[in-house]
Image (spheres, grey):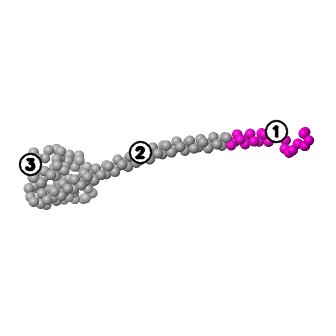
Amino acid sequence: MLDRDLARLYGVETKVLKQSVRRNTDRFPEDFMFEMSDEEFENWRSQFVTSNSDKQGLRYAPFCFTEQGVAMLSSVLNSKLAIQINIQIMRIFTRIRQLLVDNTEVRLEIAEIKHTVEQIAKKQKGHDQNIELLFEYIDRLQEKEERTVTRTNSKGEIGFKVGGK
């Protein structure tokens, strides 16, 4: 989360939040909080299409907080509001994590179903080929039988023989 968003939630100015973090740098290692690089900051600023970006709080690179950094902020901004907001944020992080886990489980189940359907399709394709081959054999047998019947009828005489001739 960005410093300005957290400051708004905690009901303090962004500069107050940043000042509190700078006074307690030992509490915020790199995996808790980092400041955007100049390149990241310029890229981020270019995403906002406003004519007066300085008034949007975009003059300085923001601090970016991880879940642990947000948790640490409640100890730095030691107020009842900060603690209550922090509890809500932690619950949201927990809910997001649970949604990701649930989503991952659903994706795995879908992948398993897709794999099963593909296997069935391969088997069915094999069965289809076997059935086509079977019909081809039946057609050949029918043609052979028709040729045999035609040959026997053309050699023999039609009708009855009278008197032994």
Q: Are marks 2 and 3 in contact (CB under 8 Å)?
A: no
Q: What numbered label is drawn on residue 24?
A: 3
Residue 137 at what x, y percent from top left?
63, 40
Q: Is label 2 in a helix, a strand or a loop?
A: helix
Say if 123 sits above or below 53 in the image: above
Q: Nearer the viewer, mark 3 or mark 1?
A: 1
Q: Mark 2 or mark 3: name the one nearer the start of the chain.
A: 3
* Residue of label 1: 155
Between the residue at mark 1 and the residue at mark 2, the CA separation in whole angstroms equals 61 Å
Which residue lies at the image location 66% right of the left edge and 40% below the top edge?
140
Name the amino acid, label 2.
His
Name the amino acid, label 1.
Lys
Between the residue at mark 3 and the residue at mark 1, the CA separation in whole angstroms equals 112 Å
Residue 115 horizontal side relative to residue 142, left or right: left
The span shown in magenta is: 142-165
* Residue of label 2: 115
Q: Mark 1 or mark 2: name the one nearer the start of the chain.
A: 2
> Quarter of the image holding residue 57?
bottom left
Name the amino acid, label 3.
Asn
